[in-house]
Image (tube, rainbow, N blue to C red):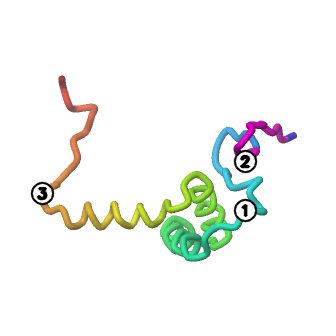
Amino acid sequence: MMKLSFNIGKINKPKRKCGHRSIGYENVKFNKKELEKGIEIELEHTCDRKMAETIAKDHLSEFDKYYTYLERMEKLLESNKKIKSLPDKRKTKI
């Protein structure tokens, strides 16, 4: 049985332990361009288009420009030749 949380001024979201954050957002209209971009990106991780759409909607339900900023971040990292590797926090001593 699904429990709903009620917050005044916010969309009522079903409480979930993991994944599928977009469930309960069936009536929310996602930006078509952003959703299509997200589906294409998520297809890198699955061959199931419906699953890729669900994952993209999960990300977009949290942040509506998720894939735009993901692309910007990836381009920034690719263009920054000075960064050879990120430090591993487990190996860093303070």
Magenta-colored segment: predominant secondary structure: loop
Describe the element under mark 1 as helix, strand or loop.
loop
Q: In which quarter of the image is residue 14?
A: top right
Check whether the beta carbons of the residues at disc 1 and disc 2 lie within 8 A of each other: yes
28 or 85, nearer to the observer: 28
Q: Name the residue under label 3.
A: 82
Neighbours of disc 3 within 10 Å: few (<14), some (14-19), many (20+): few
In this rendering, the answer to whether 77 lies above or below 32 is above
Circle 3/circle 2 CB separation < 8 Å: no
- Mark 3 and mark 1 lie on one chain; the one further toward the N terminus is 1
Which residue is nearer to you in this view: 7 or 92? 7
What residue is rendered at 71% in x and 42% in y? 9
- Secondary structure of the residue carrying numbered label 2: loop
Q: Is residue 85 highlighted in magenta? A: no
Q: In the current view of this chain or complex, which residue is farthest to the front?
A: 9
Q: Which of marks 1 and 2 is nearer the N terminus?
A: 2
Q: To which residue does mark 1 refer? A: 28
Which residue is pictured at 47% across the width and 65% down the height?
67
Q: Position of residue 2 (x, y in %)?
A: 83, 41
Q: Give the range drawn in magenta.
A: 2-12
Depth order, front residue of 88/4: 4
Label 3 sits on what residue type? Lys
Give the number of marks.
3
Quarter of the image that includes the N terminus: top right
The Cα–Cα distance between marks 3 and 1, rounded to whole angstroms, is: 42 Å
Report the mark closest to the observer, 3 or 2: 2
Which residue bears the numbered disc 2?
11
Look at discs 3 and 1 and give the one toward the viewer: 1
Three-letter residue code for mark 2: Ile
Q: Which amino acid does label 1 sit on?
A: Val
Residue at 70% of width from left, 44% of height from top?
10
